[in-house]
Each structure stands twice: as structure tokens, then as C-alpha cells.
Amino acid sequence: MVKKMSTLHPMAALRTKYVAPPIPRILIHRGTAGDAVGVSEYGDRIRDILGEKAHFVVDVCSDGANWAAPSATVAQGTFMRRFERLDLNGVDEVVECFLGDCGDAEKYAGTGEKGITSRMGRNDGSLGDVLSQGAYIALDRVLQFSPEEIISRLADIGLTGRGGAHFPVSQKWQFARAHADQQKILVVNAEEGEPGVFKDRHMLEGDPHRLIEGILIAHHSVGFEAVYIYVNGQAKQARLSLEKALLDAAQAGITGGECWERNFQLTINVRSGAGGYVCGEESVILNSIEGKRPVPRYKPPFATDVGLFGKPTVINNVETLCAVTTLFDNPPPQTKLISLSGDVPRPGLYEVPIDGAMTWSGMIANAGRNPQEIKALLVGGPSGEFIHFQQFDDVLEMSRLGAGGVVVLNSVADIQHITNSLASYNKRESCGECTPCREGSERLVNLLANVHENEKKIYELVEIMTESSLCQLGGMAGRPVLSALEQFKQEFENS
Amino acid sequence: MSLEVTPKVLKITIDGVENEVVSGSMILDAILAQEIDIPHLCKSDAQGPLGACRTCLVEIAGSSRLVAACHTPVTDGMEVSTDSERTNRIRRGVLDLTIGMSADGRGQGQAALYANSHGLSSSTYVPNPRSSKDESNVFFSLDMNDCILCGRCVDACQNTQHIGAIGINGLGENAQIGSAFNASWRDSNCTSCGQCVSECPTGALLPKTLIGSASSHRMGRDTDIVSTTCPYCGVGCGLLVHRAEERIVWVDGEPNNQSSLGMTCVKGRFGLDFVHSEDRLTTPLIRRNGRLESASWDEALQLIAEKFVEARGSFASIASAKATNEDGYIQQKFVRAVMQTNSIDHCSRLCHAPSVVALMEQVGSGATSNSYLDYEQAGTLLVVGSDTSQNHPVIASRLRKAVQENDAALIVINPIEIELCEVATVHLQPRPGTDVALLNAMANVILEENLEDQIFISQRMEGFEEWRETVQQVSPEDAEKICGVSAEDIRRAARLFADPPLSQNGNPRGSCTIWGMGVTQHTMGSDNARALINLALLCGQVGGIGNGISPLRGQNNVQGCSDVGCLPNVFPGYEAVDTVESHDRWSAAWNTELTFEKGLQSTTMIESMLEGTIDTMYVVGENPLLSDPFLAHATEAFKNLSFLVVQDIFMHETAEIADVVLPAAAFAEKDGTFTNSERRVQLVRKIVNPPGEARDDWKIISELARRVLTILGRPDQGFSHESASDIFDEMSSLMPIIGGLSHERLDREGGIQWPCPDVEHPGTPRLFTEEFPRGRGKFVGVQQGPPAAELPSKRFPFTLITGRTLYHWHGGVITRRVKGLVDMVPVVTVDINIDDAVQLNLHDGDDVQLASRRGEIIAQVKTGKRQRRGELFVPFVQLEGVAANFLTNDELDTLAGIPEYKACAVRIESPGTPTRRGKKRSLKNHF
Ligand SMILES: Cc1cc2nc3c(=O)[nH]c(=O)nc-3n(C[C@H](O)[C@H](O)[C@H](O)COP(=O)(O)O)c2cc1C
Ligand code: SF4
Ligand code: SF4
Ligand code: SF4
Ligand code: FES
């Protein structure tokens, strides 16, 4: 624990203690994506070549450009150049660039410059490194505001949850804050069980301090007794780097001690659970942490009234809290992390501005595909909808993006097959707690075998599941089905 | 939103009709209160919402989504519609999916009922049942073909009974009801309480006894329901008994009963069909030429009356703690006012007399001071010598609730590792008979660490200094040597007791002291009780919320039987027979001259019978030849009588040697009241007619009284009540403790705890809040003596502990007639420590012979680690002619006259070993 540094401004004191002077570096993008293709082999090679300058080579996490792996970035001050899909020749190019000859030095056009991903894949995971890149400035700033001011600021901006349901953050915080019970709890949802979504994992691997900072802002605004971060059991790397960051932050007095005027004294616990789609549903997480059967709770009461261990509880997604940090770092426009996969040359994580200008086409083009070759997008996974190519010029709206999983489907994609798979997926993942979803999801799969005959019944069943299910797995299970039937009816014609 | 002050009463409009509900009500509560019936398959009256069936959907004006009425709270001004086209359509769809789960596609029970009311006679889907079955439980079966996975059974087990034997195993389409770890139901920790069966809306869980088909079971066809009180143990659970065609066909717990909160145990639920047993006594029997033969009531009563008239002066009577208060009152009135003796007693002698002795001495009242509710409000529960899960199962559920829901600390003191130990904070396992040392050492720690309640001691207690000296001699280290319990555990328990953990909201809480027969059934039973009461008083843990002292009552009406005066030393309401004031009062009330002389205790009656000073006995509803210790000896005494009358519902060992046997009505065949362990007086209601010529006990006794009086030439008044309610009115007019009670009031308000002196008085959940009946409470110093009168020796190396089993009641006269209960525990078993078993080469299921100095029995070996080496446990039920009391010692506690059931010395032999007790000792030697 660090003694209170009374003379210096807390931020200055932190930096003095932890930040080393900047040096040019070669960043080797490891993380789950990089390691999967053996990027460290290239890193070792580069270190060999550099010999005594090998210490300029540092391992960092993925910067989101998973398609580019194995990759490395040369970083000198604001100058960045990423070398993609490295081969052994490419390695020489990296070294040359680092040593001075970068050829046509283009500015690194990766993900958002100053947004939520600004430090992702550019820091070595040390506290000093993230501090040097601006971590905890937002918190420092926010501490001058009253909780009311912060919450009304969030309301003005209209920040909504990024876990998929897009509930206004300000409202959730206000409900919990106003609750008479002073033992409030924050649960961070890092389960990310939805297939094809990998943003939270990237955040935790690549910039866990942004989350910690968001947690502290939420704490300053609501006042928590305890925090639980619920990490997907399979996301081992994410959990490791989060735990390291938590330890660093605690040792530096950021979470546990007297770093700021205000002593946070906050214990942050990390938990992992069984996994599965429905395990990301917020009340399943509460049950799971309490050691109960991993099924949803009925609502009302809502978690802000009766949550973890019966205490008023705020549940926020990782990206949501990171967005809070980013918001106080940099003013809007708001962005959304998109986990893009499917038929594009450059699948990966994208930070996309939701600024009223960005369209679906723009997004597809960013990933290197001509939108005209694409039949549809599946947005929001098994609870989502198909976006027909005729709508590609619509601008992106936050509320339609779910958790930000987007699958790009080319002209030969079989919509019927995909629809059936999604229905089967929902049936498999149904926890079985409530009748409409447990029974209905199975009936739906069967009815889809003969759409021609069962169309009316399918619509009826989907309405029943939507209106009556206990949680939104059952509530949304019919959404992709109806969306497919409405837009791609002809593909079901001969079934 | 939470800052708004919510009004206490909320307005809600349902289908156009405006109503008011209290805040906190759910929409479904309001709907049902308005007598509108909407489906609510997973919500029971007795339990909280589960939200699983999704059939209770309604529409709220201004809300786009339908909501589930069962878990959505009413807000002020809410407008609800239960019957719109949309709600009906969606509900119908959900019901369609629901009945599609059953094998015939029609659904069962309430699911079918609601589907029908929504226009569905069968599902529009192909049936898709889960088809597994579990028939292993003796009392009920599970058929997944009928299950709708509503989860009510699981909730009942986990959150009502706090057992947690079953769960929904598997997720999604694999979800199934089953015992935890997928063991068979019977091999799980299920106690067969049947709470789950009671909750099942479809009959997927179906009783095997009592009734036939699932649908009729759950649709409640042809049954009417009578609310009454359980005849088994002192917990006094409220039962809703379903009757069809003059038979008991099912039992639900009464959710409004404040003692049992809707629970019952296996005996209350599945154990009532003894009433319909083929071998009930149906006519009076008179012994002629050595054989009992049927006789008319007139003959039998006249014979008895004539004999009783002659027997004045050598007559004694035993009352039944199973009979009603009214029965007991009339019996003691007969004994006192007609037979002119106080020699009337009942079985509390066999269980709690030492508690009463100690309580009378130290606080001045023998009753439980608090309510079961206090257990749930306490911070620490000290449970001594009570295997609560076996003997008072529903109290055990409330204790588990206290631990699991309210984070209470639980200290168990018991030589046996009882089931409650699973949830206990500390288990102190003393050697049998060393409780005094243990409890004194706990007091020592409390004094040493200044944890005693000094204000309480100085304001409300006396005898502190003298007593303090006695416990200061016993350090935890000393106790460790005597009891075999580590000093550290003793300290920990003492601290928990004196300084109970705070509530979840940080408020201070109390400690409850709860004890059972393990404390009292010893030669130093009274000393044990005193040491325990000292401890509670030392910490001021009496008279407040969440504290108090509770001797748990064995039989259903031990408390009431004592209250109404079936004791040799007191009149009804505990007025001493030998003080002029009460003597005169009762003599006047009964219009006769009563005797001042105290009567005989049941255990000393035996002695007098052997001596011949008692030659005529009237035994009502008891079987002393099974429950008395040292049976051979008691049999001798009863055989020595010149005239024995036994009045009961079944033939039993004592009745078999009687001169006249009278057939009595069972609890289900009469009206009356029982008073439970928390002093709650509760109504017993007639459900069916008695078999044959059997009659209410009080009617038989009254008739007898009139005949005796007539022979004596005295006016035959005082025994002409019209009904049990009439008798109760006489009782309440004479007994201030129930002065405010009447059957009519109990019917209206449910059970009420005495004292309740007048009709305005709400009853008394807690005694001694301001002062003790004796003024100041009194510390009484006690010291550890030899652990038992009979210690293990070379010839008899094992200490035998007796106790009870959940599946049997007392000596087993009743439960032996309930097939399911016998199936669960068919033979007498002996628990033996596995290490002893290994050494003796004994295995589970082996038959062994246990021999003591007094007799021998055959029992089946059950190995385990429930007790330490050198100790054996045998339940005292008699099964197949075997009863532990053939072994036990009748050495008495000097003050209270209770026999030492809990400890005697035995050895293990192979079956058939000839008795080596040597010559039968003459009885003279024994005394
Ligand atoms: C089936 C299902 C799965 C979900 N999975 C996740 C998840 O993996 N991560 C997540 O943050 N939210 C998930 N949610 C949404 C959460 O229930 C909840 O709305 C969210 O965590 C709230 O945080 P936010 O307001 O910050 O978005 C899921 C919801 C459902 C119905
Ligand atoms: S909707 Fe599906 S996943 Fe959600 S509670 Fe019901 S069964 Fe479980
Ligand atoms: S009978 Fe009782 S203990 Fe057994 S499963 Fe049912 S509720 Fe649980
Ligand atoms: S067995 Fe009965 S109570 Fe249990 S889940 Fe099935 S239907 Fe519901
Ligand atoms: S009764 Fe409301 S969901 Fe079952």
C-alpha cells in the first residue's frame, strides 16, 4: 500500500512513481488470437535479430485486428505502423522499420484512436504503461464531481448498457443509489457467453485498467460495499490479466488504499462460472455467485432492489463500464465494439462510432469486403435479427446492435439452415426453468422442419414465447426466426 | 423510486372493480382475493413465487408487456385486466405447452383444470413427456410423465422444510425432478415429510397410501377438509385433513398455524390411517374365565363402578398425554372429586419431570418460556440432548431455517452426531452422563470472560455468589477430561451462547436454550436441567425476543395434560393440592371435600402395586408395560393388581392383562383441544365417526363417574357435560391461565398461547418478560456426579443410549399400524461405532443380542460414526416383540422420579446366547 502523497497531486504522484520515460518499441500482439497462430515465435526472432536492443521488444495483447495475426506494431511516440500476417521475411521488415527505415510511413489506421480501444494492444500490461497512456485521468477528473452530477451527465449523453439490453446506465445507477439499504453491490458481467462475441475478453486482456477505472467511477457515484467481476470460465487469459491489473491497482493504492483524497477501500472479487449462453443473463450470474442453480430469477424485483445476497445490486457489462471511463476521458460521439466475423477478409474487433453517419455498408467495407457481395448480416447472434442487404445504407443505431456480434453472410449463405441452427442453439441453451422457453424452444425447432405447413403456428408460438418467457433467452429466441421468415421467405419456400 | 414513501394501502382495479390491498401484495394476491381464478400453477398459497410456469399472465394498463401476476407487486392505482383476448390467448398458449408435457397430452390435476378452462381439452402438440419414475419412497412416487417442472416440490423441500433432498437436476430439456446426486429418493436425505407431495399441482408426486389417482388427488374432488391438530408429537402441527367417504384420504399442513407454518412431518402426513386400522377396539371387553370377551357398555361400566367404589384408598390412575385437555380434565376431576385421591399422573414423568422440577425451583413455572418463532429470531441456538430431527421434526425445520436463512449459530450438545450437526456451528459430543460438567464449564468460561448479563443477574436473580463458587471449580480443561470435549470447543460454545452473532442488519440477538430427553432421562436429570437453566439465566437469555428456555415436549398433549391437573401434586392450572387456599377453591368448585394429600407418581405407583397398597388401576390411553423401564419388573407389578381397567384405541401389552378394556375414540373422532410445547391451545376436530361402539374418553369417564356417585349415594352432578366445548368452558371458568379461551374463540382465531386470562387478551408468546412467577430467578449449584447409576463393566462393556426414530411414535403402538412407517423401520436396530463393529466382526444387517443385567433383545446392526466407541444406540420403539426397555435401568432420579433411559450397561452377544444373568433376583432384593 502506498502512503498518501500529500504534496503532489495524486495523478502526478502516481505517474512519478510508476511511469518510465517513453521509448520506441516493437509491440508483439499476443493475446488469445496471436498465441493461437504462434506469434511469439516471431517475437523471439525479432529479439534475436535486435540482439542487445531486444528489450525494446514488448509483448502486448491483440489490438482487435485478429485477422492480422500474427502481427507486430512499431510504435514511436504517436507514430504507429502495424505489420500484418507476418512471415519470416516480414520480420526483417519490422526490424528495419524500427531501426529507422519505415518506407511509406502511414499512420496506423487501426481501431479508434482515442476511444475505448485506444490502449488495447499498445501496452505491456504494466500500470506504468497504461498510466503513460492516460489511464485513471478520467477517474481523477470525475472525483471533482458529485455523484448526482455524474449520473445526470450520463443521462444527458444517454449512455446505455453494452451487454445487449441497452438499459440506460444513469437509471440503473440512480435506482441503486437511492435505495435505502447502504450495502450495495456492483456485479460486472464479463461472462460473454454469446457465440461470436469477443469484445469483453479483448478489453480484459488488453486494457483491464479501463474497467477498474470504470468500476471506481461507478463506486464514486453509487457507493458499493463490494464488487464482483464474473468472468467467463473459459477466458483464462482475460482472467489472468484482470487479476494482475487488480493486484497492481491495489498495491498502488488505487482501489484499496489512499491514493486519492477519497479512500475507496473497495474489495474487488473475481468469480468464474459454469458457462453457457444463459449464464450471461444477469440474474443467472447472481445465482451462480451465490452458489445456486444457474437459472434466471423472476423480475420484478429487479436487481437494483433485491440483487446479490438480497442487496441492491448494479449489474453492468465490461464494455459499459469501459465506456463510462472513456466518456469522461473524451467527449462523445459514442462508439460500440463490434465483434465481426463471417465472410470478410478482415474479421476482428472494431470500435465503430455510432454517430449517425456510419452505415452497415461502411462497416462491411472497413472489414475489406464489397457490400454488394453480401446477402445479409446476422446481428445479435441467437437473439438477434438478419439485416437484409437492402437495408445496408441505414445508419447504425445502438439499440439494434445487441452485444455487438455481427456475422457477415455472403450470397451463398443458407438462411434457412442458419435459422434452424439458431433455433436449435436456443433450445440447447434454454435453462429449462420456465415452461414457454423450455417446451417452446423445442417445439419451434420441430415446427421449422416444415415451415410451409407450420407458418401460422410458428408465429403464434413465437408470440407466446416472447410474451411469457421468464428471461430474454426465451423472450428473444423467436426474433431471428421471424426476421428470417419476413425477409427471406423464399428461402423457406420449398421446405 | 425506492425513496418514495409507499402508502400502506394501495388501490388496484381488477377487471373494472376497484379494491384495496396492503402494500407488498402481489397482483395475484389481489386477484385471488377478489375471487377471480386465473391459472397459477407454480404459486402455492404457502410459498413465495417461483415464476416458472408463466401461466399467471395479466395485462396492466399502460404497460406493453404482459406480466406474471404472482411476482409483480401491486402499485397504487394499477389497472389490471385478467380476461382480455390477449391474456387469454397467451395463457392458453402456455397451458398448451404445459399439458403437452404429459404422456396423454391432456395434463393432470390443476394443469388439466386450467387448460380446460382455457378451452383446451388436450394439447395441440404431440405429447412430449419425460418418462422416468421413482417409486423408491415408501409413501409416495414420482412419475415424470405428469410433471410440469413447476419446481414447487423443490421449493417446499428447500425453503419450507429446509431439507434440500431434491432439486431440478439437469438443464433445459434434460431437466428432471430428483434427489440431489441422482440417488434414489429413498437413499437421499429425504425425511418423507410429504411437503413436496402436498405442493405438487399435478399429482406427479402421488401418495401411495391414503388415495388412488393423481387427478382426483389434485383436483380435490369429493373431499372435504377439516382443520385439526396432529396427534403425534408436542410440536402441535396444524393439519388440514381431507376426508372422503368417512376416511382420511390426504393431509396438508395448515399454512395459518403459527406453530407449524404449513409443515408436517412424515407421521402427521402419512401416519393418520391408524385410525382406520382393522384392529381398533370396538366393544368393551371383560375378562371371563381368564379371557377377554365382548361385553355391553352397561355391563362393563357397572362392573367397573362397583369395583372402583370398593377400591377407594387403594386406587390410582394414569392419564394420557395423547388425549385431549377435556379428557384429561374430566379424568383428574373423577379421580379427585369422586375417587378422592390425588394419585393421578401421566407420561411426562417419563420425559420431562426433571425439567419441571428444575424450572419450578428456579423460575417457578414448568412451561416453555418462549415460542418457536423465537428460534428464528435468535442469534444462537443451544440444542441439548434433543435429536430434534427425529423427535420434533418440524421444530428441526425451523432451526435449520434459523441457521440457513438467518445465519443463527447452532450449538449441539449430544453424545450422538445427530442430523442437526450437519448445520451446526459447534457440536460438543460429551460422554453420556457428563452434561453437568460440560455446562458448568461453559458457565465458568462466561464468568471468566465477563460475558454474563450483570444487570439481569442483579435485578432479577438470587443465589449468584454461592452458585458462582460451584462453577468456578470447573475449568474447561477439567471438563475436557470428564466429558471428552476439547476445552477450546467448550470456550467457543460458551462465547457463542453468551454473545450471540448479530442479525444480518447488525442488530443484537438472543440465545435460545432447547432441550430434550437426553438431558432429563438420567439419574441426575434434574441436575442436568438445573445446570442448563443456570446457564440461560447467567446470560439473561430468558423473557426477551429471540431467547428463552424450551424443554421440548414429547407427546402431543403433555403440556395440556399437566395444565389440566393430571399430576399428583397440583390441581388444574398448577395450584398445589396441599395449600388451603387452592384446596378450598377446588373443593368448592367441584362441590365436594378434596384430599390434601399428594398422590403417587406413576413410577412410584409401580412400587405401591408391588407392595399391594395400590390394587386397582385405571389406565387411560397409555401402555406402561412398554414404556416403563425394566419391563419385567413393571409387568410383575401390574400382574399383582386385583383390578385393572385399560381404556385405549388398540389392544396392547397392558390391555392384554386388564380385567376390563374399554374402546376409546381416537383423536380424529372427537372434538377437543391439545396444548403444544409452546403453550398454544389448539382445536382438535372430529373428522370421522368412531368405529363400533368406541366412545370419547371423557364420555366414558363421565358415565363411570355418575355410576360411582350413584352407588355412593352422592348426587351425580359435575359430569353431565354436553360436549367438549362445555367442558372447556368449565375449565376456563376455573383456570385463570386459559380464562380468556373457548372453543368458539379458538375456532375463530386459531391456536392461542396461555396465559390468556380474559377474552380481550391476545395470548402470551413469552413468559417471564418482567419477572418470574417465583419473583427472583434462582441459581442452583450442581456438581457432576458419576455419569450413570450403572457404569460399563467388564461383563457389560457398552453404554446403551436409547432414543427415538422419526418413523415411529413412542412405544410404537400406533405407528406399528401404519404400513409405510413400518416399511421404513421394520425392526429394532442398534447403532454401533464402525471401529467397534470391525473389532467384533459385525456388519450392517447382522442380528446381535444385546444383554443387560435385566434382559436381552435381538437387534439389527447399523454401523456408523454417529457415536463414539463403547456406546450403542437403540430406539425404544417396540417392533416384532423387541423393545429396548427390556434392557434399561429403572434407577430413578430422586427428585423427579424419572427413570434412567439414556444410559445403562450392556454387552453384545450372538443371537440365541442363553441368558447368563444368573438366577432371577427376587424383587425384594431389587428394592
Ligand atoms: C440469454 C442472455 C444472455 C446474456 N449474456 C450476456 C453477456 O454475456 N454479457 C453481458 O454483459 N450481458 C448479457 N446479457 C444481458 C444481461 O442480462 C444484462 O442486461 C447486462 O449484463 C446488463 O449490463 P449493461 O446494462 O451494462 O449492459 C444477457 C442476457 C440474456 C437474456
Ligand atoms: S426463458 Fe429459457 S433460458 Fe430464460 S428462464 Fe426460461 S427456460 Fe430459462
Ligand atoms: S418428502 Fe419432504 S424431505 Fe422428502 S423430498 Fe419431499 S419435501 Fe423433501
Ligand atoms: S413433481 Fe409436481 S411439484 Fe414437482 S415440479 Fe413436477 S409438477 Fe411441480
Ligand atoms: S404462477 Fe406465476 S409464473 Fe407460475
Image: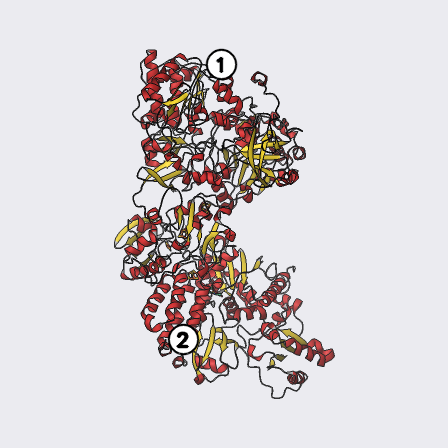
- Label placed on residue B612: 1
Farthest-out residue, left: B16
Q: Secondary structure at mark 2?
A: helix
Where residue A284 appears, as percent x and y from the top left, is 48, 59
**In the drawing, does residue B569 fall left or right of residue B589?**
right
Three-letter code for the amino acid on which mark 1 is drawn: Gly
Which chain contains the residue that carries disc 1?
Answer: B
Mark 2 on the same chain as mark 1? no
Q: Are marks 2 and 1 in contact (CB under 8 Å)?
A: no
Q: Is residue A172 visible?
A: yes
Q: Secondary structure at mark 1?
A: loop
Residue A9 drawn above or below residue B374: below
Q: On the image, numbered disc 2 is attached to which residue?
A: A416
- Label placed on residue A247: none
Q: Is residue B39 visible?
A: no
Label 2: few (<14), some (14–19) or many (≥20) C-alpha neighbours in 10 Å: many
Farthest-out residue, top: B713
Three-letter code for the amino acid on which mark 2 is drawn: Gln
Q: Nearer the viewer, residue B137 or B572?
A: B137
Residue located at (37% from left, 16% from top): B338
Q: Quadrant of the C terminus of chain A?
A: bottom left
**In the drawing, does residue B611 fall left or right of residue B43?**
right
Residue B130 drawn above or below residue B844: below
Q: Nearer the viewer, residue B9 or B134?
A: B134
Q: Nearer the viewer, residue A225 or B724?
A: B724
Residue B512 drawn above or below residue A165: above
